[in-house]
Amino acid sequence: MKETLLSHLDKAGSARMVDVTAKMPTERLARAEAVVILGRALAARLRRAGALSKGNVLETARLAGIQGAKQTASLIPLCHPLPLDVVEVHSTIVGDRVLIETMARARAATGVEMEALTAASVAALTVYDMCKAASKDIIIGPIRLLEKSGGRSGHFLRKGASRARKG
């Protein structure tokens, strides 16, 4: 099995920002998901009311996820700031959990996986923040990449995930 190099380490093992100067910008897309386990009672309450004392939980999480994606380079030290073309955050309540799916797209020299993952993470943390007064048993996770396309490494689609919708 070929050993994969960690691109954010130099030959001495020190952290570095990857030099993307020679890479051509291409259309990049990434989708990620986060799961927030609320428990049956809180999920039923949220499904019924849509809002808690702090306001509309899923709409606030959607906006927070978009804002989080735009701040990725400020939060993660070695990420490049990217000119995002679009970020989408969709949340649904299924059973005892909130399922969050995000999509980020840009025409850039490097991928948007971290922006999609940050959007999912920040949206999940916002659901937690909005609901924590009602329950301390909330669990966040997993948070994972579903799909990425564009760039030299090509297309990745997590087993069991459906492809991104066009548009």
Image: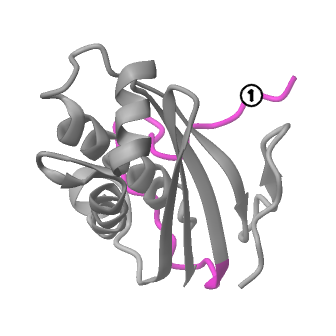
62 displayed left or right of 159: left
The amino acid type found where label 1 is placed reads Glu
Q: Residue 45 appears at what percent x and percent y?
A: 35, 35
Q: Residue 88 appears at what percent x and percent y?
A: 50, 70
160 displayed left or right of 101: right
| Magenta residues, dominant SS class | loop
**On-image quarter of the C terminus:** bottom right
Residue drawn at (36%, 67%) of the image: 66
Magenta-highlighted residues: 1-27
Residue 153 to residue 125: above or below: below
Give 15 or 107, whichever is nearer the viewer. Answer: 107
Q: Is residue 62 magenta?
A: no
Tag count: 1
Crowdedness near tag 1: few (<14), some (14–19) or many (≥20) residues, C-alpha within 10 Å: few
Residue drawn at (23%, 35%) of the image: 131
Residue drawn at (36%, 54%) of the image: 58
Question: Residue placed farthest to the top in the image?
Answer: 137
Pointer 1 residue? 3
Question: Residue placed farthest to the front in the image?
Answer: 48
153 displayed left or right of 71: right
Local secondary structure at mark 1? loop
**Residue 39 seen in this snapshot:** no
Give 107 or 57, whichever is nearer the viewer. Answer: 57
Q: Residue 93 appears at what percent x and percent y?
A: 52, 42
Residue 63, quarter of the rendered image: bottom left
